[in-house]
Amino acid sequence: MPEALLEVRDLKAFYGDFQALHGVSLALRPGEMLALIGANGAGKTTLLKTICGLVAAPRETIRWKGEAIGGLPANDIVKRGIALVPEGRRLFPSLSVEENLILGGAMGRSGPWTLAAVYAMFPVLKEKRHAPSTSLSGGQQQMVAIGRALMSNPELILLDELSLGLAPIVTRDIYAMLPDILGHGMSAILVEQDVTRALAVSQHFICLQEGRVSLEGQPAAFTRERISAAYFGTAPT
Amino acid sequence: MNWVNAIVQGILVGGLYALFAAGLSLIFGVMRLVNIAHGDLIILAAYVALVVVQLTGLHPLASLIAVVPLMAAFGYALQRGILNRTLGKDILPPLLVTFGLSVILQNGLLQVFTADSRKLNAGAMETMSFNAVAGINIGLMPLLMFLTAVAVIAGLQFVFYRTAMGRAFRAVSDDKETARLMGLDNDKVYAAAMALCLSVVAIAGIFLAIRSNFDPALGPGRLIFGFEAVIIGGLGNLWGTLAGGVILGVAQGIGAQIDPGWQLLAGHLAFLLVLAFRPKGLFPRIEG
């Protein structure tokens, strides 16, 4: 087994006094796509935020290419090649589309993703490059959020709820582009409410339930009922 | 003609008020910090200029080349060493700490420089003036001060909307957490903003020191003028801040024309009227 790109070991995370994660472990190999599923409040977003440094964690609980990075500031972690597409997109309203993208690449990691490459992937963004980012439709805003993360030329991209608030047809279009987006051997962790869609595009999945891993493995190895039981925390029938 | 003259002189001194206000507006815009020590930092800059002029014999305006970097470095260190530690969800700590800083600056200056009034001497150019139209004389220094204010506002506008630094300022102001995801170190962005703010403060301090006598107790009054110009113009709008300074200057000029004792009162009244009828200022930033 090749060495893990990202390794999370027995991670416990807190929001103030509330414990959101109770000892989560996972390993991600280079080029792998991992789906993170679970009900609302299961800890999916917390896990992503902890990996990219927005939620505190003990240093040794997260290792990136062998280096312990748990709890480093988010601005240091993104420079190592981990980018987050945040839930709800979180574009900068006072920046134009193009400025949002440029800012994403501001830390100067080199790689295939440039402004031109992002515009080639999402031509509509080039038309709207000078528009305020908030004037775009939800789907276009999601493209900006994805493009902004790609501009840092990450080796691992964390995708949080891509379909949130988007029309089903827009979601389908964005998912259709995922293989191209990840085409350069990028690894990804995908958080998604739509379990069927998430499992269809991933090699591996982890189901979280109340801050613990309730099921993990390859999507094909489990029945729908088994996954659904792990998702809702009911006994498998 | 006296009235026209009062208004013209008011416009020109409004440039100085805009210089007081620009840094205040910048810092509030980027980090939601209300800097109570802003006026005292202007006076500090005036004293730094005084020392530079005494040590080097430079012309007060030429002393800018030393005072601006000195104040900028002080601003960077102040932000990283102290003010960054006070920023958070609660708006009270930065208010209290900058209030404390204000007291320290006033007393420190008093200790070192005594309460004696000082002034920077700009030589012959202080009294130079030209006749614009019959009966209206425009002094070279007030005109230079106003043009400098316009240039500073234009420069800040350029930095804010056309440079990588300005992008970082706006991003951090929009969303601190997401800005970190872009690799921005918020503490350093804030420190850069404070350095830029104190560069403007340096310019304001030198013009203040050439225009009139100054002493260590003058800071809080300059802070009030700065606040009033920002509020009149509308928060977050740099050109509005210039307009706010001009309105304040003109109101004071008209007040002084009616009765010399009414100069400050008229400025405050103009401010209160704006606050009462247009609480967001005359030119609020258009929300996207």
Image (cartoon, coloured by chain):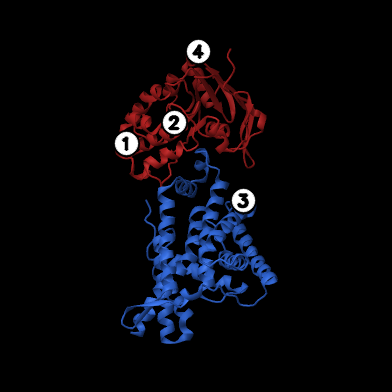
Q: Nearer the viewer, mark 2 or mark 3?
A: 3
Locate residue A22 relative to residue B184 in the image: left or right. Answer: right
Does label 2 or label 4 sit earlier along the sequence? 2
Q: Nearer the viewer, mark 4 or mark 3?
A: 3
Kind of residue sitting beneath label 2: Leu
What label does residue A221 carry, if any? 4
Q: 10 Å neighbourhood of mark 3: few (<14), some, or many (≥20)? A: some
Can see residue B37? yes
Instruction: Give the chain ID for the red colour.
Output: A
Element under disc 1: helix
Could you tell me residue B153's position as x and y percent? 42, 60
Front residue of this view, candidates B82 and A141: B82
Residue at the spot of label 3: B80
Kind of residue sitting beneath label 1: Lys
Q: 10 Å neighbourhood of mark 1: few (<14), some, or many (≥20)? A: some
Instruction: Say which chain tag 3 marks.
Output: B
Instruction: Say which chain tag 2 marks.
Output: A
Do tag 1 and tag 3 residues touch (Cβ < 8 Å)? no
Front residue of this view, candidates A162 and B136: B136
Give the residue at x 63% y 23%: A66
Chain B visual colour? blue
Kind of residue sitting beneath label 4: Ala
